[in-house]
Image (tube, helix red, strand yellow):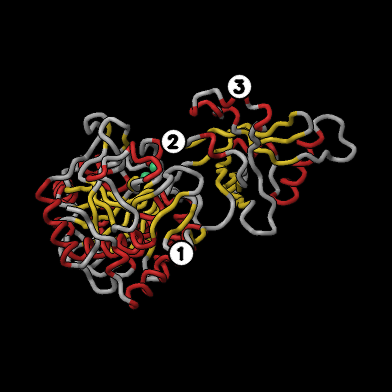
Amino acid sequence: MERKNAWKTYDAAENEKLNAVCSEYSKYLDNGKTERECVTNTIKMAEAKGYRDMNKIIAEGGKLKSGDCVYFNTMGKAVMLFKMGKQPLEKGINIVGAHIDSPRMDLKQNPMYEDTDIAYLDTHYYGGIKKYQWVTIPLALHGVVAKKDDTLVNIVIGEDLSDPVVGISDLLIHLAGDQLGKKGSVVIEGEELNVIIGSRPLEGEDKEAVKANMLKILKEKYDIEEEDFLSAEIEVVPAGPTRDFGLDRSMILGYGHDDRVCSYASVNALLSIDDIPEYTCCCLLADKEEIGSVGATGMSAKYFENAVAELLNASGSYSELVLRRALAACRMLSCDVSAAYDPNFAGAFERKNSAYLGRGVCFNKYTGSRGKSGSNDANAEYCGRLRTIMDDAGVNFQTAELGKVDQGGGGTIAYICAAYGMEVIDSGVAVLSMHAPWEIISKADLYEATKAYRAFMLNA
Ligand code: MN
Ligand code: MN
């Protein structure tokens, strides 16, 4: 039952393909540190392959036929790509779905203050983080400011090597006696995640002169006022590029592999399909997974269902009943990262049912915690069909649970889509240090995920 190391199966030609995929992925990750940036880049890649904005087609009353390629942009934070197949939509869609939001810190609505001649931005963290990991590392600011005149200002500070970076301080070891006696979860607390942004006072200013200087810089560079923070979404993320990891360059160190590695593999797989597929194929990139798939851009919203209704309508076959049948007939890979077995923390894992770096794309029949709670639990019959598809396509895959049964757990978007009655299974790439500022994946696993997702879309 032990799965083989994928690296052992590659010849020179395959190694070359793997390297090409991984270097494209590194760029995708560098250009997409927020869900908005991921949507923008994904649409750019799709448009280059002939995908058209479905909202424009709808506005013009346009029709769709097999072979047509379209995308739906949901508020700039979630995106779905569809390639229309030979079979009618009623026969179901082959969906690969992932999420493009990652753990981070968001600026509060009233973020800026000065304390003892230091200017700060106050944050509220997003998703599950070990807060102590986010101090004393270089951080960047990415996001948008929506001004009252309806203009949207894009902000990226800290990525160009000539840019300054920002960050959060930690208490020096010499005075950390009390701090180091605390539980790990409170060594750094949420209200201590305050980002230092400046320390030089504005000339001629008496009160809060450092903060005044910050506001002057923001006014000059971005034409924004302090009040504009009320309608901004600015995310504080690790600064700097994705790097090859390991002396053999077999791994990638990056921010937000969870879940942009599966997002990229899904986009790559769909855009690699040139011929008209048998069934309509969909790549779905959702937002808000890390906080429970809520909100208008999270998977619990109705945008997927609405999109299928629009596709049916543009294909001339919409009815409520046909929509229900189309949704229930779908096959889906809910693509999200898996915990990679970590020999340093072996006690948290169960070795027979762990994901291992380099052993290929993972399939998780179920996720959940404390007795599979919150899990989708894919049907055995569906798992069986997927084994055939993967073996026929020569995909290296492994099966895994997140960790030891009573150790904890997690969920994905799988159960939300399964509610329509479609077949869904979790599938993804193993990650070391998941949810840390810098996560690690194996290049082989990413490459196998692209192969798996393509094979799934063509053969499920
Ligand atoms: Mn995830
Ligand atoms: Mn996650």
Q: Can residue 60 be seen from the camera position used here?
A: no
Circle 2 — which element?
A: loop
Question: Whole-percent x and y of residue 447?
Answer: 34, 64
Residue at the location (61% across, 48% down)? 140
Residue at the location (52% across, 26% down)? 186
Residue at the location (62% across, 45% down)? 149
Circle 3 — which element?
A: helix
Q: Would you say the beta carbon of the disc 2 residue lies within 8 angstroms of ligand 2?
A: yes
Determine which residue is flagged by label 1. 249
- Asked which quadrant contains residue 59, the reply is bottom left
Amino acid carrying mark 1 in the image: Arg
Determine which residue is flagged by label 2. 128
Out of 361 and 342, give the one closest to the viewer: 342
Name above or below for residue 17 compared with residue 345. below
Mark 3 crowdedness (10 Å alpha carbons): few <14, some 14-19, many ≥20: few
306 left or right, relative to 162: left
Amino acid carrying mark 2 in the image: Gly
Between marks 1 and 2, how big is the CA–CA gap?
A: 29 Å
